[in-house]
Image (spheres, grey):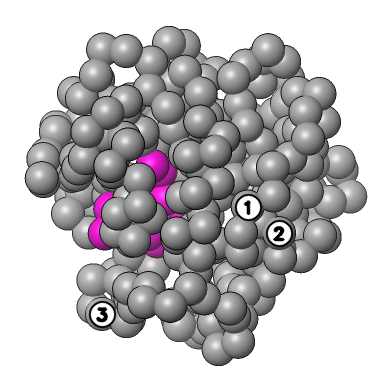
């Protein structure tokens, strides 16, 4: 079921399906609520699954389209959605940018999220100086490619940086295809022009993460071991004194292996 909620300078669209304890999924990159259709379909018999269009994507319309975006604002939007659905601490699955949003929620909105699965968070402040510098150069390079050559060239650069080869990757049978529609192109444009800048400007560090927080750090089994998001997941695990859970697939395993990914979520929760 589709819902909308007004927030600061925007209207956020979210979807509710299934029954049981609340599981809030925050997607990565340009993924909107619809991108989790396969994953949610393997979880909604056990959970009330909440998905949403992040600010600026698809049906989440901005009052001021040129206003800057921050991860703190994304976190506040997610909190607004969760408060519409439950007054109890929710479980959250954060994927890449969504994981960074979840970490901001834990740091800045205590009590809203009870348990967070943080899969390869884009959190440059978790990295050592050398890796953080490399990551900043890679992300700044993507911004430059987008500015000079457009979203398609930049999207290819994003895939390369994340170790994703869309033309040669293992996938489960029967997964939903997501062609590059005009709406998906617009989402990529927003992500590249706004969310990457928010990541580069973000100040979250491991010092902001309580060592006893209920966080399950996670990485993809086939993700490049030198990828900055993979390294951020390992750094988070070390900070928590935990072992990073290995999820099926790579950085985008939730899309390529939704059944196995959902099974892993079920086992952990």
Q: Are marks 3 and 1 in contact (CB under 8 Å)?
A: no
Q: Secondary structure at mark 2?
A: loop
Q: Position of residue 251 (x, y in %)?
A: 61, 60
Q: Earlier in the sequence, mark 3 or mark 1?
A: 3
Residue 97 visible at all: no
Residue 29 belongs to magenta span:
yes
The magenta span reads: 25-34
Q: Nearer the viewer, mark 3 or mark 1?
A: 1
Q: Secondary structure at mark 1?
A: strand
Vertical side of 24 occupied by 143: above or below: below
Q: Are marks 2 and 1 in contact (CB under 8 Å)?
A: yes
- Whether residue 71 sits left or right of residue 238 in the image: it is left
Q: Residue at x 31, y 35 (%)?
A: 47
Q: Earlier in the sequence, mark 3 or mark 2?
A: 3
Q: Which residue is mark 2?
A: 221
Query: Which SS does the magenta portion mostly show?
Result: loop
Q: Which residue is mark 3?
A: 181
Q: Earlier in the sequence, mark 2 or mark 1?
A: 2
Q: Which residue is mark 1?
A: 247
Residue 28 visible at all: yes
């Amino acid at each position: 079921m589709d819902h909308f909620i007004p927030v600061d300078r925007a209207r956020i669209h979210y979807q509710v399906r299934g029954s049981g304890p609340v599981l809030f999924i925050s997607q990565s990159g340009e993924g909107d609520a619809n991108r989790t259709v396969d994953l949610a379909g393997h979880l909604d018999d056990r959970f009330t699954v909440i998905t949403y269009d992040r600010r600026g994507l698809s049906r989440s319309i901005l009052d001021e389209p040129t206003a800057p975006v921050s991860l703190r604002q994304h976190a506040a939007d997610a909190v607004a959605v969760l408060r519409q659905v439950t007054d109890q601490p929710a479980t959250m699955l954060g994927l890449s940018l969504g994981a960074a949003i979840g970490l901001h929620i834990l740091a800045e909105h205590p009590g809203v999220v009870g348990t967070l699965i943080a899969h390869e968070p884009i959190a440059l402040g978790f990295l050592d100086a050398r890796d953080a510098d490399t990551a900043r150069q890679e992300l700044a390079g993507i911004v430059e490619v987008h500015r000079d050559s457009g979203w398609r060239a930049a999207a290819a650069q994003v895939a390369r940086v994340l170790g994703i080869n869309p033309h040669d990757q293992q996938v489960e049978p029967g997964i939903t295809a997501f062609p590059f529609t005009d709406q998906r192109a617009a989402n990529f444009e927003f992500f590249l022009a706004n969310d990457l800048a928010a990541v580069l400007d973000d100040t979250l560090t491991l010092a902001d993460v309580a060592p006893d927080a209920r966080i399950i750090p996670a990485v993809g089994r086939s993700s490049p071991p030198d990828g900055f998001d993979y390294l951020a997941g390992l750094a988070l695990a070390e900070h928590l004194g935990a072992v990073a859970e290995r999820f099926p697939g790579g950085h985008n395993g939730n899309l390529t292996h939704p059944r196995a990914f959902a099974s892993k979520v079920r086992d952990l929760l």
